[in-house]
Image (cartoon, rainbow, N blue to C red):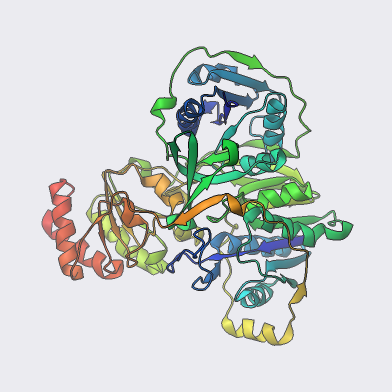
Amino acid sequence: MANPVLIVAEHLKGELTEVTFEMLGLGRQLADALQAPLWALLMGEQVRALAQHLAVADQVFLVEQSGLQLPSPDQAAAIVKAAIDAQPVSLVLVAGTNVSLGIGAVLAGRLGRPYVNFCKSVTVEAGSILFTSQLFGGKIQADVKLPDACGVVSVYPGAFPAGPGRREGQPPIESLSLSAPSPMVQFKGYIEPETGDVDITKQEVLVAVGRGIQSQDNLAIAEDLASALNGAVCASRPVIDQGWLPLSRQVGKSGMNVKPRLYLALGISGAPEHWEGMQGSQLIVAVNTDPKAPIFDGAHYGTTVDALDLVPILTEKVKAKKG
Amino acid sequence: MNLIVCLRMVPDTVEELEIAADQKSLDAEVLRYRLSDPDEHALEQALLLKEKQGGTVTAIALEMPEIDDVLFTALAKGADRAVKIAGDWARLSSTATARVFREYLMGGGQNLAADSLVLLRSQASDELAGEVGVCLAENLGLPYVGVVTGVKVAGATLEVIKEFSGGLRGEFTLGLPAVLGIQSAEKPPRYVPIAKVRAVMKSARIETVEVPAPEQASVEMVDRLYKPEAAGRARMLEGTPESVADQILEILSQQSLV
């Protein structure tokens, strides 16, 4: 029997995050393939109540200490390492989110194990496991084999189903009392999302603009189309960083997660960070002059005509249709 | 403040990427490199802090094609020093990159000044072996916060804002010296006219340094690099803008969206 597979549970504002269940589902699959138990490590300040949601794991290890509400990478890595020093594991799965960013890389370094970042799929064949990561804005994939299936894997959020990881119950819980070095970073508090003029998560139609829109002046044609379709304009990171639209309009990894009936993407390449925030849209129409843009791999319809030519014509046609 | 920005160019993903014959790396012959957006933001945040707090900005970069332009541009924007770490770094893993930066900053037993702040981009899509920023912090034994979108200095303490998701952010404090992974600066990166960069090229100098090349351990892990096969390719609408607009209108009508 191989050493256990360990997932590092992630929580934010008192709730387990979606990626935790995705990791549990994946962890179960990997543990079964390796004929190994699945363990979960839950660390935080008062998090015992969350353990009941981790029942897919065969064993939950609980580390409750003050100052662990949002541990820094070195602090979290120190705790995981202390927890597994006495009882070795094979694979450690950590969340590839902003919340957990850095924990996996530091942990892998300290364990002297390889690290696989951006893991989006896993293939199990005859006892060997192939981890596939998405690199370079989604344009390249890397297959990685870990020697003896030992290493630290950062699991891309939204890449694996959460369903298989959800089960309520009373998994065996073992409280660990670990001495971790005093934290070098202190968490002070949350800053709630800015409530903008428009809540883009509640819109049925979103016209999304990316770097391809070229200038702030061109936002007007997107606004006109959104208004004709009774929707709103949202954007990918480069547009927000330029200050052309407020943070409340950002879609993607650190922005909003949207699921409109129509997502019309103008000049958006479809990098994984953006895709993460809009993949649940019912109908995705992508306009991008680069025929190889990754957005076309996931969109339902696409066109390579220039958005600046297309949008004003489309707006007029929508208006005419509506009368 | 001793503000240090570590820059690293990344393959420009707007260009076509080709896989090298070994199937484990990108074909360097056809690669074009650019500074990533978060690198530009890390530099901008350093310049903003210098304007507020005083101090010096040192831009450090690994030697790459066109890196001199990047460093002269940093000087033209307001950096005080530009340092190029000479070598062939095209296939350097992200963890090895962090070791090169560490070697420059603390090699030979030198210490970072107590008021040092190292700024790097928070993450990049080629960091398969680990994010350079957090690995550098680990190598230097310094506190680190990533995905940073705001920095305030209060004496020897930093107050930083980190992005989570869904617009939620958190506030953290940490002491100097420290390493920050910058996602966005508080203002868009400043523009500098080409004429000013050209003038700087004539008047300023890039310092070239050498550091021992680190061991490359993590590269062999990659079994194969390849271009993804599209799982579900979009149905492409062809024709003039007029005709494509008609086709989109028809799709929207079928879905009762117009």
| Residue B201 falls in image quadrant | bottom right
* Residue B71 in the image: above or below residue B163: below
Q: Which residue sits at x=70%, y=87%?
A: B202
* Residue A283 in the image: above or below residue A11: below
Q: Is residue B109 left or right of residue B124?
A: right
Residue B252: x percent and y percent? 17, 51
Residue A182: x percent and y percent? 78, 33
Query: Relative to the observer, which residue lies in front, A197 or B183?
Result: B183
Query: Relative to the observer, which residue lies in front, A158 or A49?
Result: A158
Q: Is residue A162 left or right of residue A117?
A: left
Assign the N terminus of chain B to one quadrant of the image: bottom right
* Residue B60 in the image: above or below residue B197: above
Query: Relative to the observer, which residue lies in front, A246 or A67?
Result: A67
Q: Is residue A291 left or right of residue B198?
A: left
Q: Which residue sits at x=67%, y=58%?
A: B97
Residue B129: x percent and y percent? 60, 50
Most distant residue in the right direction: B109
Query: Relative to the observer, which residue lies in front, B255 or A128?
Result: A128
Q: Is residue A194 visible?
A: no
Residue A184: x percent and y percent? 76, 39
Q: Is residue B35 left or right of residue A56?
A: right
* Residue A36 in the image: above or below residue B99: above
Q: How many marks?
A: 0
Q: Is residue A273 visible?
A: yes
